[in-house]
Each structure stands twice: as structure tokens, then as C-alpha cells.
Amino acid sequence: SENLTEQLAICLRKSNESEGRLAAIVTSLFVIQLGETSDELYTKFRDAIMPILRDESKSSILRKHFAKAIGIICFIACEDISMTVELMKALETIFSRSYLNGDGISPILNHDLQDLHTAALSSWCLLVSTMPNNLAHELVRMYAPEKIPGLIESNHAELRNQAGEAVAVLYEIARDIKSIFAEPPESLLLILEKKANESAKYKGKKEKRLQHATFREIYNSFEEGTSPEFDVKFGREVLEVTSWTTRLYYNTLSSILAAG
């Protein structure tokens, strides 16, 4: 596997947009298949991916695939908390460009950039779930009341929905660790309720239905204490999804397995 690791790292470093997508998917699948924690493995792939992910002159589409891949690689392979925190900061630097402006307005960005921000937020959220209690508490305090909820105001459907699910995961973690920040502010509940009921603003029927379902579910989880609950069958095995965090894991892994 060492030789394959080297080859994949070379492919990641040298790839163009279409090759980069494939390299990111194959590397993610390789790490999932290996299923081992190895800071050395994570570091090798991180050093190939991060210079491109940070480079704003590179294609947003290529960076999106790399943002997804590095989240999965770190989630599975990295044991070092400080390296995980460092990656989370780099991912936040990317999606923070979609934070509300000082006047409370969402920035105007092109579609590919918003897709990149959605992927970076998704990976960031995945890594939040791996944090020890003291760091999780601090992340909830810093991001849950205003910063991530601000992304719900985006004009990009997938970023809105990803932000909604990130809020649900953050507050679920806050409740699990009995954080003093486990109660959402009234302003957040009002945003969630508005998005759950909103329909006129967004054009596509499927998009409207998706938004309605996501935010209705998130709003209900605060108001009624409900969580996502469904079973996924793999032959004779059954995976029980019973929380926002396990749903995030299922969605992340199933999307990369489907892509492969």
C-alpha cells in the first residue's frame, strides 16, 4: 500500500480538473478501504492536497473535490487532534467567504465557489464531530449562534441546506456534552422556522421541497427534540441512523462510495 500511497499523492499534486476529481475519489476510497488510523498517511495526502485547496488561482471545482476528500481522509486516518484543528481552520477560511457581510447581507458569489464553500463546510462539520468535549464546547460557542446560521441566508440551495444540517449537528453535540450553549437563541429558531415555511423565493420545485423538508426537520429537532431516524439495509446488515451526526456520516460516506 506504500507504493499506492505514493502514486496517489503524485496524482493529486499533478492533476487537472477531471483527473483531480478521480484522484480525490480514489484516494478517499483507498483510505476508507484501508480503515486505519495513521497520522503519517494523513500527512502524506494532506501535503499533496492542501497547497491546491488553498490556491485561489486553481479551479473551484477541483478545490471542491479536494475539500471533500481531505475531510474524509482526516476523519478516518488522523488521530492527532492538533492536526485536525489545523485542517478545520483551513476549511473555515474557505467557507467563511460566504459569511454574512457587516450589513447582514450574503455576499454575491459564483456557483462554483459556493459549491466549494458547501464542500468545505461539510468536511468541517464532519471533523467537529471528532472533537473532545472541551474543544467541542468552544466550537459550539463560537460558531453555532451566529456564524453558521448566517450561511442559511445564502442564495445557494446546497449551502443553505448544509448550513442547516451543520447547525443541527453542532447543537446535538452541545446537548450530548451538556454544554451551557445547548439552547439555541430565539433568532436562530426564527430563521429555521422561516426557511421551513418559505417557498416563493426559490425557483425549482425539487429545490423548494428539499429546503422545506430539511429545515422543517431541523426546526422540529429543536422544538420537539426529534432526530433523524431511518434504517439502511446492506444485504443482511442494517445500519440504524438515529441522530444528525450519524446521518452526516452516512451521507458523507454514501456520496463518496456512489461517486466511486
Image (tube, rainbow, N blue to C red):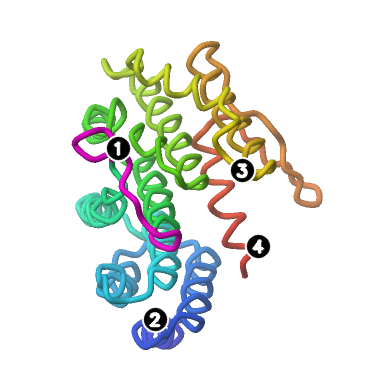
**Which numbered disc, 2 or 1, marks the residue that appears first in the sequence?**
2
Q: State the CA–CA distance, disc 1 to disc 4.
A: 36 Å
Q: Which of 135 and 220 is in front in this view?
A: 220
Q: What residue type is labelled 2?
A: Leu
Q: Mark 2 points at which residue?
A: 12
Looking at this view, name the residue that lies furthest to the right: 235
**Which numbered disc, 4 or 2, marks the residue that appears first in the sequence?**
2
Q: Nearer the viewer, mark 1 or mark 4?
A: 1
Q: Mark 4 points at which residue?
A: 258
Task: Check contact, mark 4 vs mark 3: CB within 8 A.
Answer: no
Stretch in magenta: 100-113
Residue occupying the point 35% across, 24% down: 174
Q: Which amino acid does label 1 sit on?
A: Ile
Task: Check contact, mark 1 vs mark 4: CB within 8 A.
Answer: no
Which class describes the residues within 10 Å of circle 2: few (<14), some (14-19), or many (20+)?
many
Which class describes the residues within 10 Å of circle 4: few (<14), some (14-19), or many (20+)?
few
Task: Check contact, mark 4 vs mark 2: CB within 8 A.
Answer: no
Residue occupying the point 42% across, 39% down: 163
Q: Main secondary structure of the magenta part?
A: loop
Q: What residue type is labelled 3?
A: Lys
* Rendered image: mark on residue 203: 3
**Which numbered disc, 3 or 2, marks the residue that appears first in the sequence?**
2
Q: State the CA–CA distance, disc 3 to disc 2.
A: 37 Å
Q: Name the residue under label 1.
A: 105
